[in-house]
Amino acid sequence: MEKTQATSQVANGILCSNAACYQVMDWIGKGAFGTVAKCLNVATGNLVAVKIPKKGNEDILKDEIAILKVVQALDPDKKNIVKFIEYFRFQELSCLVFEMLDKSLWDLMNERNWAPLSLNEIRTITQQVLVAFDALKGLGILYCDLKFDNIMLINHSKQPLKIKLIDFGLALPESKVKLGMIMQHLTYRAPEVTLGLPLTTAIDMWSLGCNLAHMYFGSPLFPNNCEYNWMKIYNQGPLLSLHTDIIYNLTVPLRRIQSGHSPGTQMMVKKDPGTNSQVQTAPLVMNPNITLPCPISWYKNNSTMTQGQILMELNGRPLVKEYVTSSAEGGKYFVTL
């Protein structure tokens, strides 16, 4: 790994807090957030992961530590959330210490050359993520960052597909969520976020559905290059028809989505209350590979229902009051088949 501020400052390979000293064994991750080191607790012999954020992100770091302290109230093993051990400063470095886990779901998929997971494998992961989300919802926390990188396998050789969620850098208490905030990776972003609507923990359920579809198909449903392309694909299928009336009747002004193709061109996604003009969207082109013909209740009562159809239904109820309960209900039904 190329030298960073963290790697160059830890010249002797030791990071020390008031409680413990950690011997750096390897530098295992580097990104926009900072660097992650695989370390050995010198006193106990336990391996840990030490996250060292980049300088200049003090406000983000402060928020992450506050969330982690709240999440510490949960049993990390029962609730499938990474165990946070401590925070300390070493020289000029901020250090967050976590239990050491095996590898991410992204790593696993990459090892498989992105071959889709089986429905049984997806079901196993789904159940564990739902447990974690239920626990976070009980604390009033939006996770906001569900993606393959943040779904970690604990020990894949000994406990296949046993997972925990990591990285609470983007998590927010519901009390701090403001209208118009942009969050979540675009590929897994809920429509409420893109459109600038009020946000709740329901956005995490949308992300879960998108992640499950990614596991099922081996490729994502939505692009990560621009919001306009995201909205265009969103409009291609029957998803839009499920909540067009809801969008028409909203009292909250929606965000304008900048076109990724024609500079200066914008797409309106709601009628103008002043002129009563209709919604203008990108051309609709049906995608025959992704269909959501009926609500989850229909699948429950239909003998020809497939597990794949149920999985895809998890994505079918955004922007409606029943979103959280219906999605959670569908998820629980899917994992108990």
Image (cartoon, grey):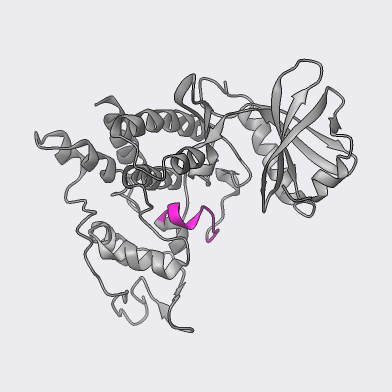
Which region of the structure is painted magenta? 180-190
Task: Say above or below: 169 vs 235.
Answer: above
Q: Which image quadrant for residue 70?
A: top right
Nearer to me, 129 or 133: 129
Q: In which quarter of the view is residue 9 placed? A: top right
Asked if residue 3 lies left or right of residue 260, the reply is right
Q: Give the residue furthest to the left.
A: 303
User: How far from the left and from the top, in percent, is residue 90?
Assistant: 87, 37
Q: Is residue 46 above or below residue 234?
A: above
Identify the residue at image location x=44%, y=33%.
Answer: 129
- How many dots with numbers? 0
Q: Which SS does the magenta portion mostly show?
A: loop
Asked if residue 314 lies left or right of residue 44, the reply is left
Give the image quarter of residue 256.
bottom left
Q: Is residue 186 magenta?
A: yes
Estimate the x, y position of residue 128 in percent, counting from the top left: 43, 28
Residue farthest top in this picture: 44
For this rendering, which residue is in front, 131 or 337?
A: 337
Residue at x 47% of width, y 37% of height: 108
Counting from the top left corner in percent of width and height, residue 5 is at: 82, 50
> Can you say which quadrant of the picture contains the C terminus?
top left
Where is residue 107 shown, x and y percent of the image? 51, 40
- Considering depth in this image, is 45 or 58 the residue closer to the camera? 45
Res 253 visible:
no
Q: Is residue 199 left or right of residue 50?
A: left
Residue in view at x 54 percent, y 59 percent:
182
Please name the residue shown 57% across and 20% down the image: 75
Mark yes or no: residue 105 visible: yes
Residue 199 is inside the magenta segment:
no
